[in-house]
Image (tube, coloured by chain):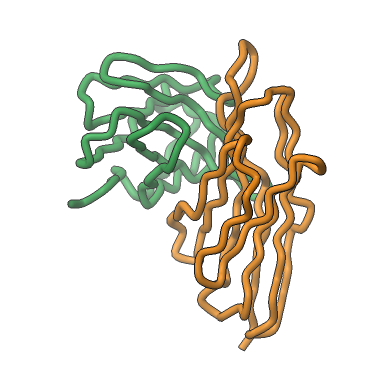
Amino acid sequence: AQKVTQAQTEISVVEKEDVTLDCVYETRDTTYYLFWYKQPPSGELVFLIRRNSFDEQNEISGRYSWNFQKSTSSFNFTITASQVVDSAVYFCALSDNHHSGNTPLVFGKGTRLSVIA
Amino acid sequence: NAGVTQTPKFRVLKTGQSMTLLCAQDMNHEYMYWYRQDPGMGLRLIHYSVGEGTTAKGEVPDGYNVSRLKKQNFLLGLESAAPSQTSVYFCASGKILWNEQFFGPGTRLTVL
């Protein structure tokens, strides 16, 4: 069965520090998708990125970057020069080939990031 | 565009009561999803739909039923509410299955 582990339950950083949120996944499939979502204190969920298993290029979007490493089954998320507005709960998620018995989409338990001014 | 809306925003039920949560989207998305979010558990998929008239089970479907009679609406029903169903429920929709999902604001449900 597939699984997503976000080992860091809570992280606190001082503004302008860089921070990396870890995501480790398990799947038996060769085709799968990985996601990151952000949930700010207001409660809504915001899509950040989707990556398929065949694309191992790292991605950068402004202060956000993602490091996908199939060899270690990890899809880590780094925020550079963190800001108070980055304070949120961040979720990593996995969707795989949906073989019988598999749940089609699994989320990690989330990492709560607090950025202190 | 309103995006994804959920009705109601809050609800308190007594054990054994029934209710329906309504999700509506105005983006003409084929795919719709219901999740529940519990403290320390992240989001868990309850049911999803790949189109009007179709539904499928997610990770935690027991105790819930769903219907997608119209493309823009996805209903989540609790026939006999239990305290274990106290949670925040999120609906989402998407253009491509298992791709970017747009979430509603959530419904906070308490079952006493």
Q: How many marks?
A: 0
Query: Residue B41 falls in which quadrant of the image?
Result: top right
The x and y percentages for residue A96 are 60, 27
Q: Is residue A81 left or right of residue B109?
A: right
Please name the residue shown 25% across and 40% down the image. Answer: B25
Please name the residue shown 57% across and 71% down the image. Answer: A87
For chain A, the rendered hue is orange
Kindly give the residue lying farthest to the right in the view shown: A72
For chain B, the rendered hue is green
Kindly give the residue lying farthest to the bottom in the view shown: A117
Q: Is residue B18 left or right of residue B72?
A: right
Q: Nearer the viewer, residue B75 or A99?
A: A99
Query: Residue B51 falls in which quadrant of the image?
Result: top left
The x and y percentages for residue A94 are 61, 36
Please name the residue shown 62% across and 50% down the image. Answer: A57
Q: Is residue B47 above or below residue A12?
A: above
Q: Is residue B24 above or below residue B18?
A: below
Q: Is residue B16 above or below residue A100?
A: below
